[in-house]
Amino acid sequence: MPARPRLAVWKFASCDGCQLSLLDCEEELLSLAEAVEIGYFLEASRKTLPGPYDLSLVEGSITTPEDAERIREVRRLSQKLVTIGACATAGGIQALRNFARIEEFVSAVYASPEYIRTLERSTPIAAHVPVDFELQGCPVNRLQLLEVISAFLAGRTPAIPRYSVCVECKRAGTPCVLVARGTPCLGPVTHAGCGAICPGYGRGCYGCYGPMETPNTPSLARRWQALGASERDLHRVFRTFNAGAEPFRRESEAHGG
Amino acid sequence: MAVRKLTLEALARVEGEGSLELSLQDGKVETARLKIFEPPRFFEAFLRGRSLSEVPDIVARICGICPVAYQMSAVHALEQGLGIAVDGPLRLLRRLLYCGEWIQSHVLHIVMLHAPDFLGLPDAIAISRDHRAEVKRALTLKRAGNEILRLLGGREIHPINVRVGGFYRVPTPSELSALREKLEKAGEEAVALLRWVATFPCPECERDYEFVSLRHPSEYPMNEGRLVSSRGLSCLPEEFDAEFEESHLPHSTALYCRLRQRGSYLVGPLARYNLNFDRLSPRVQSLAREAGLSAYCRNPFQSILVRSVEVLFACEEALRLLSLYEPPQGPSVALPAVRGEGHACTEAPRGLLYHRYRFDREGTIEEARIVPPTSQNQSSIEEDLRLWAERHLSEPEERLRNRCEQAIRNYDPCISCSTHFLRLVIRRR
């Protein structure tokens, strides 16, 4: 029997939610553990095996000088490296610091700022090392994560569509909240994958899966304005969990600093 | 005098990153320091200038394991500041949602993170080789918690359906009846889980903690109540700052929270259980006693049992809530345009979670303050480690490290929450 592929899961600045998606695979988890050899996954196991690893999943963004070094070591040890979640693919909510003076943030939170060492910016993994695939979402979709792992183990391209949340709404038969109810929605510019949950619950999409392949954000912004959104609303809505993703960053800046 | 420094691997099976440093002299542990090196994430600063309607979505991202706790403390604090009450069926649905998170988070910790310590194995997958039925049953139970989160929250991690004033959509009767069927089965699995955990060998170790939790006039506490302690504290959440203080030490990106004048205290399942045993149903009380627990527990290693009791409670409570539910007038109540300041404490799975917000008339957040459970427990964890490590200093280092890790996991520390887990450094002099 050939050796099982060795899997590693790494954490940088993050909330642990994307790794938890893996532990949330209640039924599939034991089968996954049989299909791969878990080499490094500290949230799940204290047993660690040395690299190289066939597949590394990376959660979180780079925010400290030590982490900027550590990600190079992870890349060196990994055959394939896949980033999972908004922190790893776009810098995450931590990237809000990129738009502020970091000293003010540190002193707002910590009584003794001199104890804190941190980079001024929160950056995605791809800004530091080559990445083989990026899986967007805050948090990632558990089934998409299993698809990405299966695809890499089989040596094929993951079947992750790059279209917008709108397509998922149409498939689910959810009436368009923007057209039918005038609820501002980021669905037309947001990457599919969540299953269009928010419109299904009667609220507009807030963009937690980040930009779709070809987002027309200026056009959607005009539609929001027609519905009464202020410049400030637009500035904020593009500046959340994927604030560092280029199309969202640009659109946010177009509506105030 | 020669100082020997030993660096051991990062602590596993906790949420976040940190290390443990023990300084030893003449066979005594001088200091035990839990060093948290999870990168700082600055949520309180991010919240300034945001609209209060965005707060539940933003604070969820503090922790992927207990996002509901962050959402609940936030909405209660903001609603207090707005001067509105969200009660009746909407209050009931929030408590039901919290039951889902307690089940999911507790079962994850009991089976996947803590049980391996008691059984001397590296992880839950290794446990499943000899105890496959038990692990599968626990995973099914965890799934039931996730079903609640999925229905009421829209998804398990970072739910989208919680808003200031209530929900975006309330569930339909048919969705709730499907949930009830799953929970009935989960209640039986929770009894089996408690009985299985009761068979684990449990270290003897007792300490006289000051326990702090919420206390509600009639319920086992989750969303509301007075702040009480085993040494006579009794105050409202808005008096938090008068009774507790946070300080920042050089070795950690988490803040230490202590009781003014008295020092360390313990929050979480042990505290809730000890201070609210009388709020559990006679059935849950008798199953707890059958599992070997008394009505007051000072052994931190028995927290795994208490967590199992709370899973059982949450399954029972969820079914009770479902049987009382009548659909509300609407999914949320209207928010007035007023400036305000609000405080709230709720019971996250790992313990008390305090939020305070101040906002202007447009609903823009001017100031936010969040005190997570792990920073409240940090002093207590270090005191446990000093006692526990000292007792086992003669053991080989590998064994000692395992023991220390187990003692830390008693707290189900969420390092991502408190910013912020574990490498063991032993300094011998």
Image: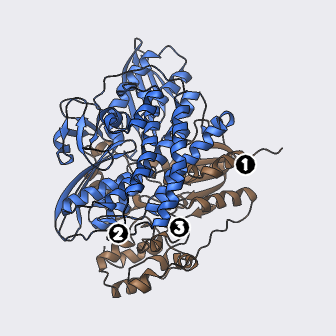
Chain colours: A brown, B blue
User: Mark 3 belongs to which amino acid?
Assistant: Cys
Q: Position of residue B183 (x, y in %)?
A: 50, 51
User: Mark 1 belongs to which amino acid?
Assistant: Ala
Query: Can residue A179 be seen in this snapshot?
Result: yes
- The tag earlier along the polypeptide, 1 or 3, is 1
What separation in Å lies between label 1 and label 3 (alpha carbons)? 26 Å
Quadrant including the C terminus of chain B: top left
Residue at 54%, 30% (x, y): give it: B117
Task: Give the residue pinned by disc 1.
Answer: A35
In this rendering, which labeled residue sits more in front, label 3 or label 2?
2
Task: Give the residue pinned by disc 2.
Answer: B331
Label tally? 3
Query: Can residue A43 be seen in this snapshot?
Result: no
Circle 3: element type: loop
Q: Which mark is residue A120?
A: none
What separation in Å lies between label 1 and label 2 (alpha carbons)? 44 Å
Query: Chain under label 2?
Result: B
Residue at 18%, 58% (x, y): give it: B341
Viewer-proximal residue, A9 or B158? B158
Query: Chain under label 3?
Result: A
Q: Position of residue A103 (x, y in %)?
A: 29, 54
